[in-house]
């Protein structure tokens, strides 16, 4: 079997040289263990943070060890009655084709018509992040104006669609016209291509002349500055991520208009989705229904084979994905 190790820590933009593909033989199954064949693995922006050796909300990756991340697999040998052969499971045992493991970190997937890959996207962590940010952090209400950055990605594309379902006017920012078209098909009201729009603050003022009630922050930097300048009094910012900063070798100063937080009496709140996981069943029930009714669409970008996983990961920082970036392993 094959797995991917972190060979050295990226400085700036990650490259394929930071990773090695390693051949390995599988350990025999002990009592209580299962052998999983992974079908899908996730690559996510937060993994960039785990490649840095520093204290954070999650431990850094070790060098020359298999990486970790969300995966969907199937049990193909079992010495555990609760996980018989054929059980589809989600785990954090990504970046590898197979895993021999205890069952503590495994969740059996519910029976559904949907492809199991959606449990890494719209029905999994990214979808749950969009829902948490809008409902539990920003408390978005019908009639309000929502601005979403990185709006065609795994989290952003769900945030835009949920924003529409919740009755908001949705303004989105993306890095290509093709991505803008996808969001148009979701009924997003106004879409900015931040690479071609010129001054982003002015473009947002034009797209949201009434001002922004809620900003779903995925990008940071210039996007945060533009959002601050366009927030209404008492606006809320759900700070989900700041992907434009993840590859910076030295920290840069923040936006020069932070004083607007005071003047406009804004509320900014960061959140980490895993701390809200007790609400996952409620989210999953709602999202399953929206998907079944066609009210939410699940876009995916798929790379084939474990050897493509580093390229898929790096592609997140190059805007290569529409919707959830995934690697198909089997
Ligand atoms: P995406 O699927 O959105 O993939 C990343 C996208 O970000 C790219 O496709 C690209 O789209 C955009 N992007 C990349 N670099 C830049 C840049 N320098 N400036 C502007 N846009 C950029 O990833 P996710 O949906 O998984 O994650 C989105 C955000 O949510 C990230 O910040 C992530 O860290 C955060 N997150 C936070 C969680 C939490 O618990 N707080 C949980 C999950 C995600 P484009 O072509 O439009 O530029």
Image (cartoon, rainbow, N blue to C red):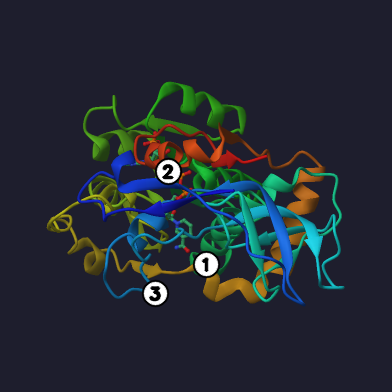
- Residue 57 is marked as 3
x, y percentage for residue 316? 41, 41
Q: Which residue is mark 1?
A: 273
Observer able to see residue 15 = no
Q: Is residue 174 above or below residue 97?
A: above
Q: Position of residue 28 (x, y in %)?
A: 69, 66
Task: Tell me if mark 2 has few (under 14), some (14-19) or many (20+) residues whose alpha carbon lies within 10 angstroms of its own.
Answer: many
Nearest the eye: 217 or 265: 217
Q: Is residue 193 above or below residue 243?
A: above
Task: Give me the C-alpha separation between circle 2 and circle 1.
Answer: 20 Å
Q: Which residue is mark 2?
A: 313
Is the shortest distance between ligand 1 and the CB of mark 1 under 8 Å? yes
Q: Quadrant of the C terminus?
A: top right
Q: Residues within 10 Å of mark 3 (few under 14, many from 20)?
A: few
Residue sitting at x 29%, y 29%: 195
291 or 251, nearer to the observer: 251
Judging from the image, what secondary structure is the residue with disc 2 in?
A: helix
Return the residue nearer the eye: 248 or 292.
248
Q: Nearer the viewer, residue 49 or 15?
A: 15
Mark number, residue 301: none
Mark before the other along the chain sequence, 3 or 2: 3
């Amino acid at each position: 079997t094959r797995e991917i190790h972190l060979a050295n820590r990226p400085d700036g933009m990650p490259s394929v040289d930071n990773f090695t593909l390693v051949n390995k033989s599988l350990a025999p199954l002990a009592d209580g263990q299962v052998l999983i064949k992974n079908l899908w693995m996730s690559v996510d922006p937060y993994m960039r943070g785990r490649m840095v050796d520093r204290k954070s909300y999650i431990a850094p990756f070790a060098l020359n060890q298999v990486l970790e991340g969300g995966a969907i697999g199937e049990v193909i040998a079992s010495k555990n009655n609760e996980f018989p052969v054929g059980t589809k499971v989600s785990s954090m045992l990504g970046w590898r084709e197979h895993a021999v493991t205890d069952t503590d970190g495994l969740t059996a997937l519910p029976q559904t018509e949907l492809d199991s890959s959606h449990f890494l996207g719209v029905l999994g962590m990214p979808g749950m992040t969009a829902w948490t940010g809008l409902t539990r952090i920003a408390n978005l209400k019908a009639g309000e104006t929502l601005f979403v950055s990185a709006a065609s990605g795994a989290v952003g594309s769900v945030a835009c669609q949920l924003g529409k379902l919740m009755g908001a006017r949705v303004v989105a920012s993306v890095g290509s016209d093709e991505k803008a078209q996808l969001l148009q098909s979701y009924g997003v009201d106004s879409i900015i291509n931040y690479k071609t729009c010129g001054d982003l603050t002015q473009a947002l003022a034009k797209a949201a002349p009434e001002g922004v009630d809620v900003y779903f922050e995925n990008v940071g930097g210039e996007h945060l500055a533009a959002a601050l300048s366009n927030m209404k009094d008492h606006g809320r910012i759900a700070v989900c991520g700041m992907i434009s900063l993840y590859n910076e070798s030295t920290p840069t100063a923040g936006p020069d208009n932070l004083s607007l937080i005071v003047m406009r009496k804004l509320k900014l709140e960061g959140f980490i989705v895993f701390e809200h996981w007790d609400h996952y069943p409620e989210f999953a029930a709602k999202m399953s229904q929206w998907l079944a009714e066609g009210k939410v669409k699940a876009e995916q970008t798929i790379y084939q084979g474990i050897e493509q996983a580093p390229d898929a990961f790096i592609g997140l920082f190059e805007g290569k994905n529409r919707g959830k970036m995934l690697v198909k392993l089997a």
